[in-house]
């Protein structure tokens, strides 16, 4: 593998224009970790005073890089920082060798970026169980340090891709007391995507000034309604990482600013949606909204049961309005439901209510909704005030094709 698959039909028309973030510079290089003829390493160097927050996979088999990053979150933000990412190899399930690779890379980056080792964050993505050829990455560090540039975020988004079919970026700029504050982020993710703290590799940068604990609280909370609400295949990666860096170069304190929090949440949600839109083999983007549950937690349980059901996802792939499969998914979720209070909509078409098909429903109306690329599904349980929205994609033959020979 190494050839980029055809671009997803759900991909945006073009990569967005991302604002340069003061205090953040980027560079990419081709180290040949796995892929030939494409960039596969990204370095970001951040100014002194940068706060870094992060959320990570809860996988019991998480990678050495994830464990190392988790140990460093909350460190001294008076120093500079750096983020190094490679694609092609996850450096996961590689025993003591994996830890050695991380320490070698951290040491190398600390030296060329002139930042403390405790402020170097690394991520690796790709094949699990194969030793990371870290010497190849060390060999391009000098090249990376010489190419650092504030406008290099789009190239960085390209370098971190694995089975992704398009680079992913999102941004917002707001005005706080007359001063512009910018937020820009990149992400990679296409398969092995299921919510569990974080669901891919994501790096968000802002020139806002936010104290680390306030930034961490904000990111952890926003993560629950963005990255933790997407699923492609119900599989949680060993390498999932979301890092948010606030350089503070705008001079605007946004730690308690609602407009900044909302803008950061929008960037995170945009990136989460882009990952689903690039789901391996995906042809449909599906929003599952559940209302009327006993609690928000129970609503999310129902929504994920629907979004993760292979029977639901294959029906959507086949453009079959098979609402019975949604009833099945709700019934098996383990959360509270009452058949005779249940209502189901495909977009604005009422499909079922009161334990039976709606008398106004026509099969051809449901089939018309299934022809769309973006498909909203709504379920009301009629039990309480709990709500949740998750996003997923269909399950096609393309997913099998991609994953049946991923290591070849």
Image: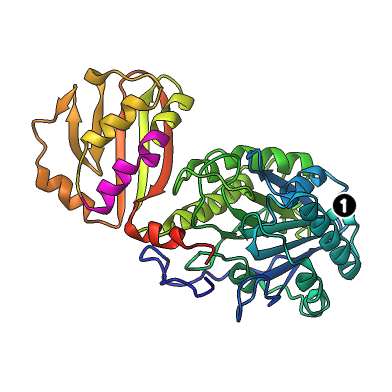
Location of residue 379 with respect to 150 vertically, above or below: above
Residue 42 position by quadrant:
bottom right
- Secondary element type, mark 1: helix
Residue 301 position by quadrant:
top left
Please name whichever residue, 323 or 206, is drawn nearer the observer in this view of the structure: 323
Q: Which residues are magenta?
A: 304-319
Visible in this render: residue 183? no
Residue 344: x percent and y percent? Answer: 24, 33
Please name whichever residue, 110 or 131, is drawn nearer the observer in this view of the structure: 131
Which residue has dot 1 on it?
A: 118
Residue shown at 14% from the left, 30% from the top:
357
Residue 317 lies in magenta, yes or no? yes
Please name whichever residue, 67 or 134, is drawn nearer the observer in this view of the structure: 134
Visible in this render: residue 220? yes
Q: Main secondary structure of the magenta part?
A: helix
Residue shown at 35% from the left, 39% from the top:
309
Question: Dot 1, how many residues are within 10 Å of its Cα: few (below 14), some (14-19), or many (20+)?
Answer: some
Q: Is residue 71 left or right of residue 201?
A: right
Residue 204: x percent and y percent? Answer: 65, 56
Location of residue 107 with respect to 377 vertically, above or below: below
Residue shown at 42% from the left, 66% from the top:
12
Q: How many marks?
A: 1
What colour scheme has been applied to the protein in the rendered image?
Answer: rainbow
Location of residue 223 with respect to 246 vertically, above or below: above
Residue 51: x percent and y percent? Answer: 79, 50
Q: Is residue 369 left or right of residue 404?
A: left
Residue shown at 45% from the left, 53% from the top:
276
Residue 377: x percent and y percent? Answer: 30, 41
């Amino acid at each position: 593998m190494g050839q980029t698959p055809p671009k997803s039909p759900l991909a945006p028309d073009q990569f967005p224009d991302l604002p340069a973030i003061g205090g953040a510079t980027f560079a990419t290089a081709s180290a040949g970790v796995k892929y030939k003829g494409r960039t596969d390493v990204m370095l970001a160097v951040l100014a002194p005073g940068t706060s870094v927050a992060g959320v990570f996979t809860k996988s019991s088999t998480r990678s050495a890089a994830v464990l190392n990053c988790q140990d460093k979150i909350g460190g001294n933000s008076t120093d500079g920082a750096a983020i190094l990412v490679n694609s092609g190899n996850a450096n996961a399930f590689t025993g003591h060798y994996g830890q050695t690779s991380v320490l070698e890379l951290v040491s190398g980056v600390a030296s060329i970026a002139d930042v403390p080792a405790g402020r170097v964050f690394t991520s690796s993505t790709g094949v699990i169980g194969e030793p990371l050829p870290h010497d190849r990455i060390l060999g391009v560090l000098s090249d990376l340090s010489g190419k650092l540039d504030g406008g290099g975020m789009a190239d960085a988004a390209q370098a971190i891709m694995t089975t992704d079919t398009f680079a992913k970026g999102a941004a917002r700029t707001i005005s706080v007391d007359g001063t512009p504050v910018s937020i820009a982020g990149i992400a990679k993710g296409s398969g092995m995507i299921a919510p569990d703290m974080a669901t891919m590799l994501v790096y968000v940068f802002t020139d806002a000034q936010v104290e680390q604990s306030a930034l961490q609280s904000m990111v952890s909370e926003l993560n629950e309604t963005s990255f933790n609400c997407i699923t492609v295949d119900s599989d949680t990666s060993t390498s999932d990482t979301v890092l948010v860096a606030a350089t503070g170069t705008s001079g605007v304190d946004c730690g308690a600013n609602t407009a900044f929090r909302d803008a950061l949440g929008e960037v995170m949600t945009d990136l989460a949606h882009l990952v689903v839109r690039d789901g391996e083999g995906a042809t449909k983007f599906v929003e599952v909204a559940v209302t009327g549950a006993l609690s928000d937690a129970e609503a999310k349980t129902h929504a994920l049961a629907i979004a993760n059901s292979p029977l639901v996802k294959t029906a959507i792939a086949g453009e079959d309005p098979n609402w019975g499969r949604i009833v099945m998914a709700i019934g098996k979720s383990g959360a509270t439901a009452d058949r005779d209070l249940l209502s189901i909509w495909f977009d604005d078409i009422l499909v079922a209510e009161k334990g039976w098909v709606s008398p106004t429903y026509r099969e051809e109306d449901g089939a018309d909704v299934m022809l769309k690329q973006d498909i909203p599904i709504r379920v009301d349980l009629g039990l309480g005030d709990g709500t949740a929205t998750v996003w997923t994609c269909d399950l096609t033959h393309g997913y099998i094709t991609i994953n049946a020979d991923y290591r070849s």
